[in-house]
Image: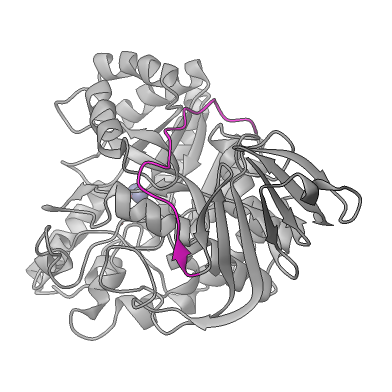
Amino acid sequence: MKTLIEGGTVITAIDITAADVLVEDETIVAIAAPGSHSWADEADKVIDASGKYVIPGGIDPHTHMELPFGGTSASDSFESGTRAAAWGGTTTIVDFAVQVKGESLVGGFDDWMERAEGNCAIDYGFHMIAGDINDESLADMDVLIDRGCTSFKLFMAYPGVFYSDDGEILRAMQKAAETGTLIMMHAENGMAIDVLRAQALERGETDPVYHGLTRPVITESEATHRAIKLAELAGAHVYIVHMSAKEAVAEVAEARDAGQPVFGETCPQYLFLSHEDHLSKEGFEGAKYVCSTPIRKRADGHQDALWTSLATNDLQVVSTDHCPFCMDDHPTLGTQKKLGIGDFTAIPNGLPGVEDRYQLIYHGGVVGGRFDLNRWIELCATAPAKLFGMYPKKGTIAVGSDADIVIFDPGTEWTKSVDQHHMDVDYSAYEGMEVKGKVETVLLRGKVIVDGDEYLGRKGDGAYLPRERMSVHH
Ligand code: URP
Ligand code: ZN
Ligand code: ZN
Protein backbone atom coordinates (compact mmCIF):
# COMPACT_ATOMS: atom_id res chain seq x y z
CA MET A 1 0.00 0.00 0.00
CA LYS A 2 1.53 3.30 -1.11
CA THR A 3 0.21 6.71 -0.05
CA LEU A 4 1.47 9.97 -1.49
CA ILE A 5 1.02 13.21 0.46
CA GLU A 6 1.63 15.94 -2.05
CA GLY A 7 1.79 19.72 -2.20
CA GLY A 8 2.26 20.40 1.51
CA THR A 9 4.89 22.12 3.61
CA VAL A 10 6.77 19.56 5.67
CA ILE A 11 7.76 20.88 9.08
CA THR A 12 10.13 19.14 11.45
CA ALA A 13 12.05 20.40 14.47
CA ILE A 14 14.76 21.57 12.05
CA ASP A 15 13.35 22.19 8.55
CA ILE A 16 10.48 23.82 6.72
CA THR A 17 10.36 22.33 3.22
CA ALA A 18 7.90 22.29 0.32
CA ALA A 19 7.99 18.53 -0.23
CA ASP A 20 6.00 15.44 -1.12
CA VAL A 21 6.06 12.45 1.20
CA LEU A 22 5.76 8.83 0.07
CA VAL A 23 4.51 6.27 2.56
CA GLU A 24 4.74 2.56 1.97
CA ASP A 25 2.71 0.43 4.38
CA GLU A 26 3.64 1.78 7.85
CA THR A 27 6.79 3.72 6.98
CA ILE A 28 7.93 6.93 5.32
CA VAL A 29 10.03 5.72 2.37
CA ALA A 30 10.84 8.91 0.46
CA ILE A 31 10.65 12.70 0.63
CA ALA A 32 11.24 14.79 -2.50
CA ALA A 33 10.71 18.18 -4.07
CA PRO A 34 7.27 18.56 -5.68
CA GLY A 35 7.39 17.68 -9.40
CA SER A 36 10.71 15.86 -9.13
CA HIS A 37 9.20 12.36 -9.18
CA SER A 38 6.39 10.27 -10.67
CA TRP A 39 5.12 8.69 -7.45
CA ALA A 40 1.49 9.51 -8.24
CA ASP A 41 1.54 6.82 -10.96
CA GLU A 42 2.29 4.08 -8.43
CA ALA A 43 0.39 5.37 -5.39
CA ASP A 44 -2.76 3.62 -4.16
CA LYS A 45 -3.88 6.84 -2.48
CA VAL A 46 -2.99 10.49 -3.01
CA ILE A 47 -3.66 13.10 -0.30
CA ASP A 48 -3.63 16.72 -1.42
CA ALA A 49 -1.91 18.82 1.27
CA SER A 50 -1.70 22.05 -0.72
CA GLY A 51 -1.66 25.05 1.57
CA LYS A 52 -1.31 22.77 4.62
CA TYR A 53 1.45 21.82 7.02
CA VAL A 54 2.62 18.21 7.02
CA ILE A 55 3.88 17.54 10.55
CA PRO A 56 4.87 14.54 12.67
CA GLY A 57 2.15 12.96 14.76
CA GLY A 58 2.14 14.51 18.21
CA ILE A 59 3.67 12.67 21.17
CA ASP A 60 2.07 13.27 24.54
CA PRO A 61 4.40 11.81 27.16
CA HIS A 62 2.11 12.40 30.14
CA THR A 63 -1.44 10.99 30.21
CA HIS A 64 -3.52 9.14 32.81
CA MET A 65 -6.22 7.08 31.14
CA GLU A 66 -8.41 5.34 33.75
CA LEU A 67 -6.20 6.54 36.65
CA PRO A 68 -7.75 5.70 40.03
CA PHE A 69 -7.70 8.91 42.06
CA GLY A 70 -9.56 10.16 45.13
CA GLY A 71 -12.29 7.51 45.14
CA THR A 72 -13.00 7.56 41.42
CA SER A 73 -11.09 7.07 38.15
CA ALA A 74 -10.14 9.37 35.29
CA SER A 75 -13.13 9.38 32.95
CA ASP A 76 -11.30 8.61 29.71
CA SER A 77 -10.66 4.93 29.11
CA PHE A 78 -7.78 3.86 26.91
CA GLU A 79 -10.34 3.55 24.13
CA SER A 80 -12.02 6.96 24.43
CA GLY A 81 -8.88 8.87 25.45
CA THR A 82 -6.66 7.62 22.66
CA ARG A 83 -9.41 8.22 20.09
CA ALA A 84 -9.69 11.81 21.34
CA ALA A 85 -5.90 12.13 21.14
CA ALA A 86 -6.06 11.03 17.49
CA TRP A 87 -8.63 13.75 16.73
CA GLY A 88 -6.14 16.22 18.18
CA GLY A 89 -3.24 14.98 16.02
CA THR A 90 -1.49 12.98 18.72
CA THR A 91 -0.44 9.54 17.49
CA THR A 92 1.57 8.34 20.51
CA ILE A 93 0.97 8.65 24.23
CA VAL A 94 3.12 7.52 27.11
CA ASP A 95 0.72 6.79 29.94
CA PHE A 96 1.53 5.89 33.54
CA ALA A 97 1.22 2.34 34.87
CA VAL A 98 0.67 2.38 38.61
CA GLN A 99 2.28 0.53 41.50
CA VAL A 100 0.50 1.19 44.80
CA LYS A 101 1.85 0.51 48.29
CA GLY A 102 2.12 -3.17 49.07
CA GLU A 103 1.89 -4.31 45.45
CA SER A 104 4.63 -5.27 43.06
CA LEU A 105 6.02 -3.04 40.33
CA VAL A 106 5.76 -5.73 37.67
CA GLY A 107 2.22 -6.57 38.80
CA GLY A 108 1.19 -2.93 38.33
CA PHE A 109 2.80 -2.83 34.91
CA ASP A 110 1.03 -6.03 33.80
CA ASP A 111 -2.31 -4.64 34.99
CA TRP A 112 -1.91 -1.46 32.92
CA MET A 113 -0.71 -3.37 29.86
CA GLU A 114 -3.88 -5.43 30.08
CA ARG A 115 -6.09 -2.35 30.34
CA ALA A 116 -4.58 -0.86 27.19
CA GLU A 117 -4.17 -3.99 25.07
CA GLY A 118 -6.48 -4.01 22.05
CA ASN A 119 -8.24 -0.82 23.11
CA CYS A 120 -6.05 2.00 21.82
CA ALA A 121 -6.56 4.13 18.73
CA ILE A 122 -2.92 5.25 18.68
CA ASP A 123 0.43 3.83 19.75
CA TYR A 124 1.19 3.81 23.46
CA GLY A 125 4.00 3.22 25.90
CA PHE A 126 4.18 3.30 29.67
CA HIS A 127 6.18 5.02 32.35
CA MET A 128 5.93 3.30 35.73
CA ILE A 129 4.68 5.08 38.83
CA ALA A 130 6.82 3.57 41.59
CA GLY A 131 4.63 3.98 44.67
CA ASP A 132 6.48 1.58 46.94
CA ILE A 133 10.27 1.71 46.71
CA ASN A 134 11.86 -1.36 48.32
CA ASP A 135 14.41 -4.07 47.41
CA GLU A 136 11.88 -5.97 45.34
CA SER A 137 10.59 -3.00 43.34
CA LEU A 138 14.14 -1.78 42.68
CA ALA A 139 14.98 -5.22 41.27
CA ASP A 140 11.73 -5.17 39.26
CA MET A 141 12.92 -2.02 37.48
CA ASP A 142 15.28 -4.26 35.46
CA VAL A 143 12.35 -6.39 34.32
CA LEU A 144 10.42 -3.34 33.17
CA ILE A 145 13.41 -1.87 31.34
CA ASP A 146 13.62 -5.13 29.36
CA ARG A 147 9.94 -4.68 28.50
CA GLY A 148 10.50 -1.16 27.14
CA CYS A 149 9.54 0.89 30.18
CA THR A 150 12.58 3.11 30.65
CA SER A 151 11.22 5.91 32.86
CA PHE A 152 9.86 5.89 36.41
CA LYS A 153 7.67 8.49 38.10
CA LEU A 154 8.08 9.32 41.77
CA PHE A 155 5.89 11.57 43.88
CA MET A 156 7.03 14.05 46.52
CA ALA A 157 3.31 14.84 46.91
CA TYR A 158 0.20 12.87 47.95
CA PRO A 159 1.39 11.35 51.29
CA GLY A 160 -0.30 8.03 51.91
CA VAL A 161 -1.06 7.52 48.22
CA PHE A 162 1.90 7.70 45.83
CA TYR A 163 4.38 9.57 48.09
CA SER A 164 8.04 8.57 48.43
CA ASP A 165 10.33 10.01 51.10
CA ASP A 166 13.80 11.39 50.31
CA GLY A 167 15.56 8.11 51.15
CA GLU A 168 13.27 6.15 48.83
CA ILE A 169 13.75 8.75 46.12
CA LEU A 170 17.52 8.56 46.46
CA ARG A 171 17.47 4.77 46.15
CA ALA A 172 15.31 4.89 43.02
CA MET A 173 17.53 7.57 41.53
CA GLN A 174 20.65 5.50 42.22
CA LYS A 175 19.01 2.61 40.39
CA ALA A 176 18.09 4.91 37.49
CA ALA A 177 21.68 6.17 37.31
CA GLU A 178 22.96 2.60 37.26
CA THR A 179 20.56 1.57 34.48
CA GLY A 180 20.66 4.76 32.38
CA THR A 181 16.94 5.33 32.83
CA LEU A 182 15.00 8.48 33.65
CA ILE A 183 13.30 9.57 36.87
CA MET A 184 10.20 11.72 36.37
CA MET A 185 9.36 13.74 39.45
CA HIS A 186 6.09 15.17 40.73
CA ALA A 187 7.81 17.94 42.65
CA GLU A 188 5.60 19.34 45.41
CA ASN A 189 6.28 19.20 49.14
CA GLY A 190 3.35 16.95 50.03
CA MET A 191 4.01 16.93 53.76
CA ALA A 192 3.93 20.73 54.00
CA ILE A 193 0.88 20.88 51.73
CA ASP A 194 -1.01 18.44 53.97
CA VAL A 195 -0.45 20.77 56.96
CA LEU A 196 -1.68 23.80 54.98
CA ARG A 197 -4.73 21.89 53.75
CA ALA A 198 -5.72 20.79 57.26
CA GLN A 199 -5.29 24.34 58.56
CA ALA A 200 -7.44 25.73 55.72
CA LEU A 201 -10.24 23.26 56.43
CA GLU A 202 -10.10 24.15 60.14
CA ARG A 203 -10.69 27.77 59.15
CA GLY A 204 -13.72 26.71 57.08
CA GLU A 205 -11.97 27.36 53.77
CA THR A 206 -13.54 24.67 51.62
CA ASP A 207 -13.94 26.13 48.09
CA PRO A 208 -11.88 24.90 45.10
CA VAL A 209 -9.72 28.04 45.14
CA TYR A 210 -8.10 26.83 48.37
CA HIS A 211 -6.62 23.94 46.42
CA GLY A 212 -4.28 26.48 44.83
CA LEU A 213 -3.79 28.60 47.93
CA THR A 214 -2.63 25.60 49.97
CA ARG A 215 -0.05 24.65 47.32
CA PRO A 216 1.90 27.92 47.23
CA VAL A 217 4.84 28.45 44.88
CA ILE A 218 7.42 27.57 47.52
CA THR A 219 6.01 24.05 47.89
CA GLU A 220 6.78 23.50 44.19
CA SER A 221 10.13 25.33 44.01
CA GLU A 222 11.49 23.72 47.21
CA ALA A 223 10.58 20.23 46.01
CA THR A 224 12.02 20.93 42.56
CA HIS A 225 15.27 22.08 44.15
CA ARG A 226 15.39 19.00 46.38
CA ALA A 227 14.66 16.64 43.47
CA ILE A 228 17.49 18.20 41.48
CA LYS A 229 19.92 17.94 44.39
CA LEU A 230 19.00 14.31 45.09
CA ALA A 231 19.49 13.56 41.37
CA GLU A 232 22.90 15.23 41.53
CA LEU A 233 23.78 13.11 44.56
CA ALA A 234 22.71 9.94 42.73
CA GLY A 235 24.19 10.94 39.38
CA ALA A 236 20.76 10.47 37.79
CA HIS A 237 18.88 12.21 34.99
CA VAL A 238 15.70 13.84 36.28
CA TYR A 239 12.65 15.22 34.45
CA ILE A 240 10.28 17.46 36.42
CA VAL A 241 6.66 16.98 35.35
CA HIS A 242 3.77 19.46 35.03
CA MET A 243 5.66 22.59 36.12
CA SER A 244 3.61 25.72 36.86
CA ALA A 245 5.71 28.07 39.02
CA LYS A 246 8.35 30.31 37.49
CA GLU A 247 10.51 29.91 40.61
CA ALA A 248 10.56 26.14 40.09
CA VAL A 249 11.50 26.58 36.43
CA ALA A 250 14.36 28.82 37.60
CA GLU A 251 15.68 25.84 39.60
CA VAL A 252 15.66 23.70 36.46
CA ALA A 253 17.33 26.44 34.41
CA GLU A 254 20.07 26.94 37.00
CA ALA A 255 20.87 23.23 37.12
CA ARG A 256 20.89 22.95 33.32
CA ASP A 257 23.18 25.97 33.06
CA ALA A 258 25.53 24.20 35.46
CA GLY A 259 25.56 21.19 33.14
CA GLN A 260 23.32 18.85 35.12
CA PRO A 261 21.01 16.57 33.08
CA VAL A 262 17.73 18.06 34.31
CA PHE A 263 14.64 18.43 32.11
CA GLY A 264 11.19 19.89 32.57
CA GLU A 265 7.75 19.99 31.05
CA THR A 266 4.72 22.20 31.36
CA CYS A 267 1.16 21.73 30.11
CA PRO A 268 -1.39 23.88 28.24
CA GLN A 269 -3.45 24.52 31.39
CA TYR A 270 -0.50 26.31 33.02
CA LEU A 271 0.08 28.42 29.90
CA PHE A 272 -3.48 29.46 29.06
CA LEU A 273 -5.44 29.37 32.33
CA SER A 274 -4.98 31.30 35.55
CA HIS A 275 -5.79 31.30 39.25
CA GLU A 276 -7.64 34.59 38.87
CA ASP A 277 -9.84 33.70 35.87
CA HIS A 278 -10.38 29.99 36.38
CA LEU A 279 -9.49 28.36 39.71
CA SER A 280 -11.14 31.14 41.70
CA LYS A 281 -14.43 31.08 39.73
CA GLU A 282 -17.61 31.48 41.79
CA GLY A 283 -19.11 28.55 43.67
CA PHE A 284 -17.89 25.10 42.73
CA GLU A 285 -16.99 26.05 39.11
CA GLY A 286 -13.29 26.32 40.04
CA ALA A 287 -13.23 22.52 40.53
CA LYS A 288 -12.90 22.19 36.75
CA TYR A 289 -9.40 23.62 37.10
CA VAL A 290 -8.19 21.70 40.16
CA CYS A 291 -4.95 19.92 39.33
CA SER A 292 -1.52 19.54 40.93
CA THR A 293 0.70 21.45 40.63
CA PRO A 294 -1.97 24.19 40.69
CA ILE A 295 -2.73 26.73 37.99
CA ARG A 296 -1.02 29.91 39.16
CA LYS A 297 -1.60 33.65 39.38
CA ARG A 298 -1.21 35.55 36.13
CA ALA A 299 -0.48 38.71 38.13
CA ASP A 300 2.69 37.01 39.39
CA GLY A 301 3.92 36.39 35.83
CA HIS A 302 3.94 32.58 35.81
CA GLN A 303 2.20 32.10 32.43
CA ASP A 304 4.48 34.57 30.60
CA ALA A 305 7.55 33.03 32.22
CA LEU A 306 6.49 29.51 31.19
CA TRP A 307 6.05 30.60 27.56
CA THR A 308 9.50 32.18 27.66
CA SER A 309 11.06 29.05 29.17
CA LEU A 310 9.65 27.00 26.27
CA ALA A 311 11.20 29.42 23.79
CA THR A 312 14.60 29.43 25.50
CA ASN A 313 14.74 25.65 26.15
CA ASP A 314 14.71 26.04 29.92
CA LEU A 315 11.73 23.69 29.54
CA GLN A 316 11.85 21.05 26.80
CA VAL A 317 8.38 19.53 26.48
CA VAL A 318 4.68 20.37 26.50
CA SER A 319 2.63 17.38 27.68
CA THR A 320 -0.98 17.40 28.87
CA ASP A 321 -1.11 15.48 32.16
CA HIS A 322 -4.52 14.48 30.75
CA CYS A 323 -6.52 13.26 33.74
CA PRO A 324 -10.19 14.17 33.22
CA PHE A 325 -13.01 14.03 35.75
CA CYS A 326 -16.61 15.02 35.01
CA MET A 327 -18.35 17.90 36.76
CA ASP A 328 -21.73 16.12 36.64
CA ASP A 329 -22.01 12.42 37.28
CA HIS A 330 -20.25 10.20 34.76
CA PRO A 331 -22.66 7.57 33.34
CA THR A 332 -20.66 4.61 34.68
CA LEU A 333 -18.14 6.10 37.11
CA GLY A 334 -20.64 8.23 39.06
CA THR A 335 -19.72 11.34 41.04
CA GLN A 336 -16.33 12.82 40.18
CA LYS A 337 -15.36 16.49 40.73
CA LYS A 338 -18.44 16.91 42.96
CA LEU A 339 -16.94 14.53 45.52
CA GLY A 340 -15.25 17.71 46.70
CA ILE A 341 -18.29 19.92 47.28
CA GLY A 342 -17.72 21.37 50.74
CA ASP A 343 -14.15 20.02 50.93
CA PHE A 344 -11.63 21.03 48.26
CA THR A 345 -9.24 18.28 49.39
CA ALA A 346 -11.69 15.66 48.06
CA ILE A 347 -11.83 17.08 44.52
CA PRO A 348 -10.10 14.59 42.19
CA ASN A 349 -7.03 16.28 40.73
CA GLY A 350 -6.71 16.65 36.99
CA LEU A 351 -7.84 18.27 33.76
CA PRO A 352 -8.72 17.06 30.27
CA GLY A 353 -6.43 18.09 27.43
CA VAL A 354 -5.08 15.21 25.34
CA GLU A 355 -7.10 16.41 22.34
CA ASP A 356 -6.23 20.08 22.78
CA ARG A 357 -2.46 20.25 23.14
CA TYR A 358 -0.97 20.18 19.63
CA GLN A 359 -3.33 22.81 18.24
CA LEU A 360 -3.25 25.00 21.36
CA ILE A 361 0.53 25.18 21.36
CA TYR A 362 0.45 26.18 17.69
CA HIS A 363 -2.10 28.86 18.55
CA GLY A 364 -0.39 30.25 21.63
CA GLY A 365 3.20 29.66 20.56
CA VAL A 366 3.38 30.22 16.82
CA VAL A 367 0.33 32.42 16.12
CA GLY A 368 1.04 34.19 19.41
CA GLY A 369 4.56 35.02 18.18
CA ARG A 370 6.37 33.34 21.07
CA PHE A 371 8.36 30.80 19.03
CA ASP A 372 8.61 29.42 15.52
CA LEU A 373 7.09 26.45 13.73
CA ASN A 374 10.15 24.26 14.33
CA ARG A 375 10.03 24.83 18.08
CA TRP A 376 6.31 23.92 18.10
CA ILE A 377 7.15 20.54 16.56
CA GLU A 378 10.11 20.06 18.85
CA LEU A 379 8.06 20.69 22.01
CA CYS A 380 5.11 18.52 21.01
CA ALA A 381 6.77 15.65 19.12
CA THR A 382 10.53 15.54 18.65
CA ALA A 383 11.77 16.31 22.16
CA PRO A 384 9.38 13.84 23.82
CA ALA A 385 10.48 11.20 21.29
CA LYS A 386 14.15 11.79 22.12
CA LEU A 387 13.75 12.08 25.88
CA PHE A 388 11.62 8.97 26.15
CA GLY A 389 13.52 6.69 23.76
CA MET A 390 11.26 6.69 20.69
CA TYR A 391 13.34 8.73 18.21
CA PRO A 392 13.66 8.55 15.19
CA LYS A 393 10.95 5.90 14.87
CA LYS A 394 8.58 8.56 16.23
CA GLY A 395 8.69 12.34 16.49
CA THR A 396 9.83 13.43 13.04
CA ILE A 397 9.19 13.14 9.33
CA ALA A 398 12.15 11.29 7.89
CA VAL A 399 12.84 8.34 5.63
CA GLY A 400 12.56 5.22 7.78
CA SER A 401 10.38 6.78 10.47
CA ASP A 402 6.88 5.49 11.23
CA ALA A 403 4.35 7.21 8.99
CA ASP A 404 2.63 9.01 11.88
CA ILE A 405 1.69 12.17 10.00
CA VAL A 406 -0.72 15.05 10.59
CA ILE A 407 -1.98 17.38 7.92
CA PHE A 408 -2.63 20.64 9.69
CA ASP A 409 -4.51 23.61 8.29
CA PRO A 410 -2.82 26.72 9.71
CA GLY A 411 -5.59 29.09 8.59
CA THR A 412 -8.84 27.66 10.01
CA GLU A 413 -10.35 29.76 12.79
CA TRP A 414 -12.75 28.08 15.20
CA THR A 415 -14.11 28.13 18.73
CA LYS A 416 -13.26 25.44 21.26
CA SER A 417 -16.15 23.80 23.08
CA VAL A 418 -17.22 20.67 24.91
CA ASP A 419 -19.70 20.19 22.03
CA GLN A 420 -16.95 19.53 19.52
CA HIS A 421 -14.40 17.58 21.54
CA HIS A 422 -14.18 13.80 21.72
CA MET A 423 -12.81 13.31 25.25
CA ASP A 424 -15.17 11.50 27.63
CA VAL A 425 -15.66 14.46 29.92
CA ASP A 426 -18.49 16.96 30.25
CA TYR A 427 -16.54 20.22 30.03
CA SER A 428 -13.75 21.83 28.07
CA ALA A 429 -11.11 23.70 30.06
CA TYR A 430 -10.94 26.09 27.07
CA GLU A 431 -14.69 26.61 26.48
CA GLY A 432 -15.36 29.53 24.13
CA MET A 433 -11.71 30.14 23.28
CA GLU A 434 -11.23 31.35 19.69
CA VAL A 435 -8.25 29.64 18.09
CA LYS A 436 -6.44 29.40 14.79
CA GLY A 437 -5.17 26.21 13.15
CA LYS A 438 -6.86 22.80 12.93
CA VAL A 439 -5.87 19.18 12.61
CA GLU A 440 -7.34 17.94 9.33
CA THR A 441 -5.99 14.47 8.55
CA VAL A 442 -4.15 12.00 10.77
CA LEU A 443 -2.18 8.95 9.70
CA LEU A 444 -1.06 6.33 12.18
CA ARG A 445 1.71 4.17 10.74
CA GLY A 446 0.36 4.88 7.25
CA LYS A 447 -3.33 4.32 7.99
CA VAL A 448 -5.65 7.34 7.74
CA ILE A 449 -7.49 7.37 11.07
CA VAL A 450 -8.92 10.91 10.94
CA ASP A 451 -10.09 12.46 7.70
CA GLY A 452 -11.69 15.87 8.23
CA ASP A 453 -14.86 15.26 10.24
CA GLU A 454 -14.68 11.52 9.85
CA TYR A 455 -13.06 9.00 12.19
CA LEU A 456 -11.77 6.08 10.13
CA GLY A 457 -9.78 4.25 12.78
CA ARG A 458 -10.88 1.57 15.18
CA LYS A 459 -9.96 0.39 18.62
CA GLY A 460 -6.86 -1.74 18.49
CA ASP A 461 -5.17 0.29 15.74
CA GLY A 462 -2.69 1.42 18.38
CA ALA A 463 0.17 -0.87 19.37
CA TYR A 464 2.34 -1.07 22.48
CA LEU A 465 5.59 0.75 21.90
CA PRO A 466 8.56 -0.60 23.82
CA ARG A 467 10.95 2.30 24.40
CA GLU A 468 14.73 2.58 24.38
CA ARG A 469 16.61 4.76 26.83
CA MET A 470 16.68 8.52 26.20
CA SER A 471 18.69 9.71 23.19
CA VAL A 472 19.52 13.26 24.28
CA HIS A 473 21.45 14.55 27.20
CA HIS A 474 20.56 18.22 27.01
O1 URP B 1 -3.59 16.91 39.06
C1 URP B 1 -2.95 16.05 38.47
N1 URP B 1 -1.74 16.35 38.03
N2 URP B 1 -3.48 14.82 38.31
C2 URP B 1 -2.86 13.71 37.73
C3 URP B 1 -1.91 13.00 38.66
C4 URP B 1 -0.55 13.65 38.66
O2 URP B 1 -0.10 14.07 39.71
O3 URP B 1 0.09 13.72 37.62
ZN1 ZN C 1 1.95 14.42 39.07
ZN1 ZN D 1 0.28 13.37 35.83
Residue 276 falls left or right of residue 6:
left
Residue positioned 27% across, 66% down in the render: 425
Front position in the image: 395 or 228: 395
Residue positioned 36% across, 22% down in the render: 171
Q: What stretch is highlighted in magenta?
A: 453-472
Q: Where is residue 297 in the image (x, y as percent from the top left)?
A: 42, 74
Front position in the image: 400 or 364: 400
Q: Is residue 306 visible?
A: no
Count the labels in the image.
0
Q: Is residue 125 visible?
A: yes
For the C terminus, give its image quadrant: top right
Q: Position of residue 255 (x, y in %)?
A: 59, 42
Residue 276 falls in which quadrant of the image?
bottom left
Q: Where is residue 470 in the image (x, y as percent from the top left)?
A: 57, 30
For the N terminus, give its image quadrant: top right
Query: Can you say whether 415 is above or below 69 in the image?
Result: below
Q: Position of residue 310 (x, y in %)?
A: 62, 58
The answer to whether residue 161 is magenta is no
Q: What colour-coding does the image apply? A: one colour
- Assign the magenta stretch its main secondary structure: loop
Residue 374 falls left or right of residue 201:
right
Residue positioned 26% across, 51% down in the render: 77
The answer to whether residue 469 is magenta is yes
Front position in the image: 340 or 409: 409
